[in-house]
Amino acid sequence: MADRPLSPHLSVYRMYRYSVLTSITNRFTGVVLSIGLIVLVYWLMAAAEGAGAYERALGVLSSGPFKVIFLIVLAAFSYHLLAGIRHLIWDSGRGLERAQSQRSAWLIGIAALLLFAGLAWWTHLHWAAGAAGRP
Amino acid sequence: MSLRSPLGRALGAGSAKEGVRHWWTQRLSAVALVPLAVWFVVSMLSLPSHDYATVTVWMGQGWTAVFLILFVLTAAWHSQQGVRVVVEDYVHNSGTKSLALALVTFFHAVVAVAGVFAILKVAFGGAV
């Protein structure tokens, strides 16, 4: 086992570094979006089933717990989109210097918060309009 | 020291350039998902209502159905590749890992097929 080169074990790294935080957050938000994909397909299948099944699914999807899930998915989307673009820029060989990467970490963190705030506000307007239009 | 396997040395075969496939397709799907995911989220939030009539009419429009199918397929593909790496990194028992990777692949295949089926059924007017 040890006669081939081994990567240093995880415990040698300082885990509070910004690079560790942005990396694990990108991974975590990706998994959250994978779960969101299940909700999307559930919604699509309900629409394919017909009006009755769709109304039942909409009842489930507009319940309190699902509103929380939608907000979590929107937050994950906001971060994963921007962090993914940052990764694609890195892949082109740009922005890899430590100072640039620290700056872009802050940039995507703040931009993701702003994007999420905007999307959450837009979603809130939808929910408010939906609640008003409901009999 | 050489990192080549004894079999590889005996066969004298070089790299088939397959090593970067996962890396490359993960990036390719990421690039495609930037416009597709933004389009999907903006579309969902732009719909005046999410009731059955509004949603099925929207889904039935030609380009909506096409981009929705592209979005579901690309998202399932990208998700499968991402979750695969997570399993590879955190599941260390080789039996459990193989089982988990198989389940991840099957699960994403179901998600992709169900999504495409549902969109096509609505688009072709099969859902009444």
Image (cartoon, rainbow, N blue to C red):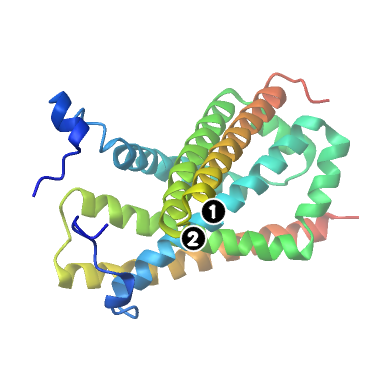
Is residue A41 shown above or below B67? Answer: below
Please report the residue visible at 79 percent of the width from the left and 25 percent of the height from the top: B127
Residue at 72% across, 46% down = B49
Q: Chain of mark 2?
A: A
Q: Position of residue B13 (x, y in %)?
A: 15, 25
* Quadrant in which the N terminus of chain A is drawn: bottom left
Furthest toward the left, the residue is B1
Q: Nearer the viewer, residue A113 or A127?
A: A113
A38 relative position to A83: left or right: right
Q: Amino acid at mark 2?
A: Thr
C-beta proximity under 8 Å, tags 2 and 1: yes
Q: Residue A20: percent from the left, percent from the top?
A: 33, 71
- Tell me the element at label 1: helix
Q: Chain of mark 1?
A: A
Quadrant into which the C terminus of chain A falls: bottom right
The front one of A60 and B85 is: B85
Judged from the image, the secondary structure of the residue bearing numbered disc 2 is helix
Residue under numbered circle 2: A29
Q: Quadrant of residue B24?
A: top left
**Residue B46 point in image, percent of width and height:** 60, 47
At x 71%, y 23%, the residue is: B121
* Badge 2: residue crowd in 10 Å (few <14, some 14–19, many ≥20): many
